[in-house]
Amino acid sequence: MPELSRPTQEQTDQRPAVLLLVYSWDMFSAILAIFEALAPFAGGVAIGVRMVAVPLVLQLLGALSSAAYAAILIIVASLLTRRKQWIQRIQIIALGGAVILSVVSLLLGYARGGVDIVPVLTTALIILIDLLAIVVMTERRVTTWYSERSRPPRYAAGTLGFWVVSSIALIIVDAVR
């Protein structure tokens, strides 16, 4: 029986190539989120799967929520090649939160009977790519890459927290309207 070779020190220090795919997806998603942050100033905000006219306060909240999502993706993408564990955790939480919020928005839209097929398919594709990125981030080589224990900086945790809370607030507003 052939002997299994052990990875050399050089191989274990090499950054996993699949992180480049996650980085690319983060940057693409961040660009889309920036465009989404600018959209409310056109007079409406995307709540769930539909555009609605809302008061200025909700337009600002929608813009800030999208900007916070773009910011957390840019923060994580810029640090993705560092070996700190918090980067992996924040990445998984951000992508998982985006998946959950998208599913809830789709379900609310479906419950109201106002969901077209194009937004559903687009959202489903984004959800699948986010889930694929989560799978990549939990893969064994990637998990062993993030070996340095540390706490996330306050700016990263605060940005992530603001995005989650503001997104939930916008979904609640959509649910009661």
Image (cartoon, grey):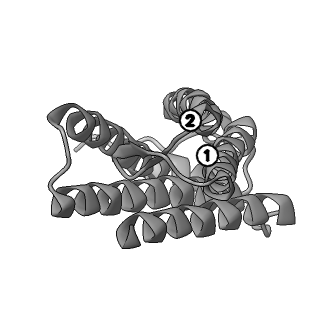
Near-viewer residue (166 or 13): 166
Near-viewer residue (53 or 51): 53
Near-viewer residue (168 or 85): 168
Q: Could you tell me residue 49's position as x and y percent?
A: 33, 46
Q: Badges 1 and 2: C-beta atoms under 8 Å apart?
A: yes
Q: Secondary structure at mark 2?
A: helix
Residue 116 lies left or right of residue 171; in this view the side is left
- How many C-alpha atoms fall within 10 Å of the one at disc 2: few (<14), some, or many (≥20)? many
Residue 149 lies left or right of residue 65; in this view the side is right
- How many C-alpha atoms fall within 10 Å of the one at disc 1: few (<14), some, or many (≥20)? many
Residue 130 visible, this angle: yes
Residue 23 lies left or right of residue 133; in this view the side is right
Considering only vertical position in the picture, is 152 above or below 35?
Answer: below
Q: Could you tell me residue 154's position as x and y percent?
A: 85, 66
Image quarter (top left, top right, bottom left or bottom right) of the C terminus:
bottom left
Residue 85 visible, this angle: no
Give the quadrant of residue 106.
bottom left
Q: Could you tell me residue 171's position as x and y percent?
A: 44, 64
The answer for how far apart the CA atoms under marks 1 and 2 are is 6 Å
Near-viewer residue (129 or 138): 129
Q: Residue at x 36, y 69 (%)?
A: 175
Q: Amino acid type of disc 2?
A: Glu
Q: Residue at x 54, y 61 (%)?
A: 167
Residue corresponding to mark 1: 66
Please tell me the numbered disc located at residue 36. 2
Q: Could you tell me residue 114's position as x and y percent?
A: 20, 49
